[in-house]
Image: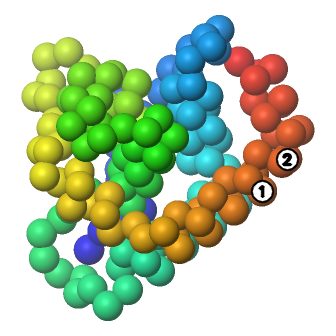
Amino acid sequence: MRKRFEQQLEIGVKPISETPVLLKSRDDIPALVMALLMIYKTPEHNSKVFNLLEDTILVGKQKTGRIGLNLWQIFVLSQYRLALNLDYDRLHYMAYSDSTLRQLLGIETESGIERKEISYQRIPDNVHLLDNETLSKINDVIVDFGQKKEAVVLYVNDR
């Protein structure tokens, strides 16, 4: 069964919550990373997102079988793809080489620890599980979260 995200930290795997954000950048990736981290760290909003993901991805599925990507990884990959207008080849390359994305996915390891990989085919197979209706509902949650400017200002000032 798919999990929301891995609760138990693994030895040598960098924690998602400690993903570095380049604050002094005009690129769109740091803003996306900061937004995803804020959703990850805010229980009210991540539970709304995970409930939508579970209603779409897990409905009618058996609770046994091979473990796939967790819901957080599917959400992050889909947000990167949509926000940055990436094709699956570029997304796969970034999931292989971009350490910030890898840490955000929960697969970035310390040096000396065996590297975790996501194969190319797993990315489109899992990201395709999210339909337009679900993505629209998730977008509404993100917009609602973004309208709470106090949270954003507090987060940036704390850094």
The answer to whether 144 appears left or right of 120 in the picture is right
Q: Residue furthest bottom?
A: 60
Residue 24, image x and y in percent?
Answer: 65, 8
The structure residue drawn at horizontal position 62% and vertical position 38%, both measured from the top left corner, is 35
Query: Where 10 sits versus 133, above or below?
Result: above
Provide the secondary structure element on which disc 1 rests: helix
Tag 2: amino acid: Lys
**Residue 104 appears in which quarter of the rendering?**
top left
Tag 1: amino acid: Asp
Please tell me how crowded label 2 is: few (under 14), some (14-19), or many (20+) other residues with Cα within 10 Å: few
Marks 2/1 in contact by CB < 8 Å: the verdict is yes
Q: Nearer the viewer, residue 42 or 73?
A: 73
According to the image, label 1 marks what residue?
Answer: 144
The answer to whether 154 appears left or right of 30 in the picture is right
Residue 150, image x and y in percent?
Answer: 89, 38
The structure residue drawn at horizontal position 12% and vertical position 69%, both measured from the top left corner, is 66
Residue 80 seen by the camera = no
Residue 101, image x and y in percent?
Answer: 38, 31
The disc placed on residue 84 is: none
Query: Where 132 sits versus 11, above or below?
Result: below
According to the image, label 2 marks what residue?
Answer: 148
Residue 130 seen by the camera = yes
The structure residue drawn at horizontal position 40% and vertical position 24%, both measured from the top left corner, is 100
| Separation of marks 2 and 1 at Cα, in angstroms | 7 Å
